Image (cartoon, helix red, strand yellow):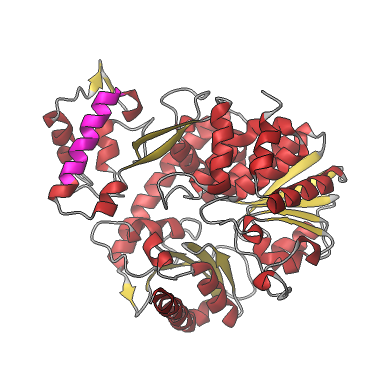
């Protein structure tokens, strides 16, 4: 691995952001024992993989702990860890005032907690606000944490500052960004994510290409990939196996290689182009908007050192595999995958992935049966205890993007929380669209504002956010959330005039 790649990348990162990563790395060097505290989703697991590998290279004793959320109980528990330092990855920024006094590094990308430091930078905190906490977050340096750098990406910058040889961990930063859907807005990675991507591509660690963006390029039979397509929805093909097969056969495509179903990644460029042209024509004849048709194709990311036909080779499939591990209580399996285990961990992960797909399918059917209630500015459904609180946000996004859905308002999903608390709580997950964000919607602010009004906690990103609230405050929470989103959209409309 070339030694110049790390410093070259470092010189491209915004100076303030890189300086915060360097300071965080110095804090880590002063510690002999480190506890890594991370989130259970793909971005969090990838971030933990980066931190764990970097600490091992630095000769530090490290343990990794996974959390659904960073509440008071989790922070209290971490204070008792006995480690010299706690490294929060893909979480912590929204709770920084509660972490005060703990020797900690935060490498995150969520909207920072501003409650304890309303001073400079329009309420955003400086690294010096809390002497014991070293904070690395793109949002503090004019870089989007929703589209330009993920939690894994922030963690990667700290790892790179620790040792330039950690440039080899760049694929995990790309994995985290894709898992966090940071390539959705423009169908490619941008900002600091792109800087990391270009460095990884130059080293042969990642390959980037223009291609069909549907899930399953490495593992699904082509007709199955099209049958399960959803964004964009393909009339007569999505949810229609016979329609998908007929479409491909009409184009003269050989569907099998011997007795084996062919997958998308095995097609020639000409075969791919012919199918994509046919799909574009189908959408045009169905009078889909140009923006919808554009979502067919964009950048896809491949890890060339991984075996063909396996989910760990494609970034989107690998990220889904990590989510399957984390959302079903086995984030440790995902961590082992990130650190290179392609034996037992991969086998366990594939079983979890199968179960994850089944759970999502059943949950989506249940959500559709329950029905969605539309308010003025939001829409919502309550899954009760029928959908796990770890996947209800994913279901909300799937429902919002399903055929015939109302995309003019964010989808808000409730599920009974499975975590212990002195009073019963509800998990709330909200998902929006890029169009709503461009109109002024910020779900991170809206969810936090509404939750804190009733003694809950909330936060996240402008397009996707979560909260936990007392059960009895649900209706009041919905009213405040509806009003808050409405105010955001009205303010956005006024600014556009």
Q: Is residue 474 above or below residue 340?
A: below
In depth, the one of 385 and 460 nearer the eye is 460
The image shows residue 62 at horizontal and vertical percentages of 77, 41
Q: Main secondary structure of the magenta part?
A: helix
Where, by quadrant of the figure, is residue 193 drawn?
A: top right
Q: Report whether 458 appears left or right of 11.
A: left
Q: Residue at x 85, y 52 (%)?
A: 82
The image shows residue 8 at horizontal and vertical percentages of 67, 34
Q: Which quadrant would the C terminus be assigned to in this image?
A: bottom left
Q: Which quadrant would the N terminus be assigned to in this image?
A: top right
Residue 205 can be seen in this image:
no
Q: Residue at x 29, y 22 (%)?
A: 268
In depth, the one of 29 and 492 nearer the eye is 492
> What's the magenta region?
267-282
Q: Report whether 51 appears left or right of 414.
A: right
Q: Is residue 373 above or below residue 14?
A: below
The image shows residue 320 at horizontal and vertical percentages of 46, 43
Q: Report whether 204 appears left or right of 119.
A: left
Q: Residue at x 25, y 24 (%)?
A: 270
Q: What is the count of numbered marks?
A: 0
User: Any magenta on residue 91?
Assistant: no
Where, by quadrant of the figure, is residue 342 drawn?
A: top right
Where, by quadrant of the figure, is residue 102 drawn?
A: bottom right
Q: Kindly give the residue lying farthest to the front in the view shown.
A: 497
């Amino acid at each position: 691995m070339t030694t110049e790649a790390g410093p070259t990348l470092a010189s491209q990162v915004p100076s303030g952001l890189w300086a915060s990563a360097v300071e965080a790395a110095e804090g880590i060097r002063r510690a002999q024992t480190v506890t890594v505290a991370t989130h259970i989703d793909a971005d969090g697991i990838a971030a933990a993989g980066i931190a764990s590998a970097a600490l091992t290279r630095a000769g530090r004793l490290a343990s990794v702990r996974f959390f659904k959320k960073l509440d008071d109980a989790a922070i209290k528990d971490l204070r008792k860890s006995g480690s010299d330092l706690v490294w929060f990855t893909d979480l912590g920024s929204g709770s920084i005032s509660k972490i005060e006094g703990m020797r900690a590094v935060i490498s995150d990308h969520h909207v920072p907690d501003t409650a304890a430091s309303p001073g400079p930078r329009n309420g955003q905190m400086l690294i010096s606000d809390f002497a014991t906490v070293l904070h690395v977050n793109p949002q503090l340096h004019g870089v989007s944490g929703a589209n330009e750098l993920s939690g894994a990406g922030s963690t990667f910058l700290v790892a790179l500052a620790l040792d330039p040889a950690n440039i080899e961990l760049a694929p995990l930063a790309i994995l985290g960004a894709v898992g966090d859907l940071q390539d959705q807005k423009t169908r490619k990675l941008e900002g600091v994510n792109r800087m990391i991507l270009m460095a990884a591509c130059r080293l042969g660690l990642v390959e980037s290409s223009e291609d069909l963006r549907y899930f399953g390029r490495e593992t699904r039979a082509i007709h199955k990939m099209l049958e399960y397509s959803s964004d964009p929805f393909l009339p007569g093909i999505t949810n229609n196996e016979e329609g998908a097969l007929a479409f491909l056969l009409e184009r003269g495509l050989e569907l099998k290689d011997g007795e084996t179903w062919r997958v998308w990644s095995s097609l020639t460029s000409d075969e791919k182009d012919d199918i994509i042209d046919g799909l574009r024509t189908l959408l045009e004849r169905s009078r889909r908007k140009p923006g919808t048709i554009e979502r067919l194709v964009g950048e896809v990311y491949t890890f060339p050192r991984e075996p063909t036909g396996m989910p760990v080779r494609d970034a989107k499939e690998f990220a889904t595999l990590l989510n399957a591990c984390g959302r079903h209580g086995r984030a440790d399996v995902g961590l082992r995958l990130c650190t290179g285990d392609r034996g037992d961990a991969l086998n366990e992960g594939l079983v979890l992935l199968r179960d994850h797909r089944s759970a999502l399918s059943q949950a989506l059917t249940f959500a559709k049966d329950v029905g969605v209630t539309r308010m003025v500015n939001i829409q919502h459904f309550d899954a009760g205890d029928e959908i796990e609180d770890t996947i209800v946000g994913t279901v909300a996004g799937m429902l919002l993007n399903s055929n015939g859905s109302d995309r003019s308002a964010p989808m808000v999903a409730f599920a009974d929380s499975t975590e212990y608390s002195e009073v019963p709580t509800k998990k709330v997950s909200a998902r929006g669209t890029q169009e709503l964000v461009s109109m002024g919607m910020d779900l991170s602010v809206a969810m936090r504002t509404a939750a804190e009004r009733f003694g809950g906690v909330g936060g996240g990103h402008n397009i996707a956010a979560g909260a936990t609230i007392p059960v009895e405050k649900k209706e009041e929470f919905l009213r405040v959330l509806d009003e808050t989103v409405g105010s955001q959209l009205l303010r956005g409309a006024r600014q556009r005039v």
